[in-house]
Image (cartoon, helix red, strand yellow):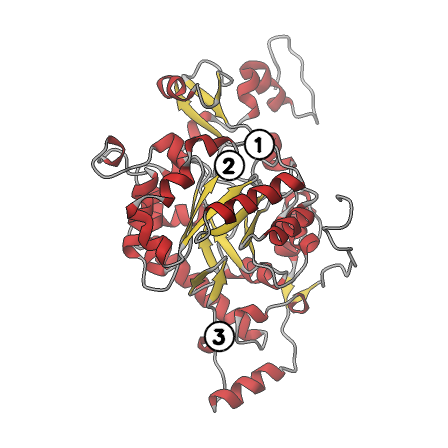
Amino acid sequence: MTGAGGLSAPGFPEAAVRERARSGTAAAFPPLSGYGHALLGATPGAPEAGAPYGAPGDLLETGRLVPPVFMPRRLEKLIELGREPQHSDVDLTTDIGGFHAPLPLYVSAFGSTRAAGDGLGTAVGRQAGRLGLPLVIGENVLPVSGYGRPGTASDGAGAASGLLRRIRAYADELPDGAGGVAVQQSTEDADAEVWNLLHSDPHVQPLLASGRLAFELKVGQGAKPGLGGMTLVDAAEADRLADRYRVRDTLGEKGDVLRCSAPGTVTEEILRQQIRFMRSNYPRVRVWVKLFPGRDVDRAAAVAWQAGADAVTVDGAEGGTGWAPHAFLDGVGLPLGECLRRIGPGAHPLLVSGRMWEGGRVARSLALGARAAGLGRAALLAADEDPDRGLIRLTACLELELRLLVSALGKYAVAELAPEDLWPQPAAERRPDPTTREPS
């Protein structure tokens, strides 16, 4: 490869440098042609290098579930049932942040509103509702897609992704006593009063009355730790949003504009006060907190639980569906396995997301202390494959894998998974109480 001047640089990332020389700031992001179609996330490292995501020894990638030879719990189950137990006897029901779920799974919020638009996000919600799985709706759905109140323009045929429309589509399918919806709000979107709108909306009252409504305070996300949300919008949309967001013509002369949310400022005291504010103002609503994979994620989780959060969600650096700079996708934030190691197992409800699509990764996450795992890209791809049954079939496969794996370990409740089930064993590091020590 040579340029106009005939130079070449063997062994140097010459092609990437030349692309930056041609495109400027647009080269910091994935190709614009894939926006709304490509579901982005960290790129795994070369398997032969043994370092997926630059994290040697990541138990979620390289660890193995190892059954013991002697299984006293299997004997207990045999006595309870009066027969040899099978994988179908495994209890997978889980309390997920105050919601009853048939499986240790929920559907994560989608970072890219365009990818989840055109009805795909609603199709995911309908299937999640039929399954009774909790559903998280992103903080940017209302500002970007509208509220979707019946009889208004945002509830029209062309606005299938409005916030209330998504909630109604999910709730209409929901069986009694299962599932629930968590609606995110970040610091910047507080002006949109998402939670106040929902809390007083008669269409949402059945969820509120049955204890199946949560508000999730979004501190950050896995694909862009330390940054706010980023979406591509056209020039007209940029003008509409300019009074609420920073819109930048960062991407060259392609017509699209980058809409950037502020990351929000959080300290321990601010986080405590925000959670107490939520508990005080919305006493019948479950309180969830979503954290990005920061180096003090264990301390942040402990602060949230002590302040009264019903669940803490941690999005590993592998997480994503949305628009993030290359430098963040591949080089910023802790892998989910390291987040789990730092937080450690315990009784607190910890929800995790990041490349969840098969039973082995979910089971390893649960063994390391997670209560449930979130489906993001996998849920969107499944609904893209079949808008009516794709997620249902994907979940059926996951359910079977989990039953087989848990029973093979000689256990018959998913909550019994523990670090002892993994090889190699997580590092036996004795860490002090994260609420009383200095940040990592």
Tag 1 residue: 264
Name the image quarter holding residue 101. Answer: bottom left
In this rendered view, identify the residue nearer to me: 10 or 366.
Answer: 366
Dot 3 surroundings within 10 Å: few (below 14), some, or many (20 or more)?
many
Dot 1 surroundings within 10 Å: few (below 14), some, or many (20 or more)?
some
Q: Are the two marked residues, 2 and 1, in contact with CB atoms closer than 8 angstroms?
A: yes
Instruction: Give the number of the disc on residue 90.
Output: 3
Camera-nearest label, 3 or 1: 1
Q: Are the two marked residues, 3 and 1, in contact with CB atoms closer than 8 angstroms?
A: no
Give residue 399's position: percent from left, percent from top.
44, 65
Give residue 310's position: percent from left, percent from top.
53, 55
Q: Is residue 421 left or right of residue 412?
A: right
Give residue 38's position: percent from left, percent from top.
44, 36
**Disc on the earlier residue, 3 or 1:** 3
CA separation, marks 2 and 1?
7 Å
Q: Is residue 147 visible?
A: yes
Q: Quadrant of the N terminus?
A: top right
Position of 404 relative to 11 (above/below): below
**Disc on the earlier residue, 3 or 2:** 3
Q: Residue at x 50, y 30 (%)?
A: 188
Q: Amino acid at mark 1?
A: Gly
In this rendered view, identify the residue nearer to me: 162 or 428.
Answer: 162
Give residue 401's position: percent from left, percent from top.
48, 66
Tag 2 residue: 186
In this rendered view, identify the residue nearer to me: 8 or 58.
Answer: 58
Judged from this view, the residue extending furthest toward the top is 5
Instruction: Give the number of the disc on residue 95.
Output: none
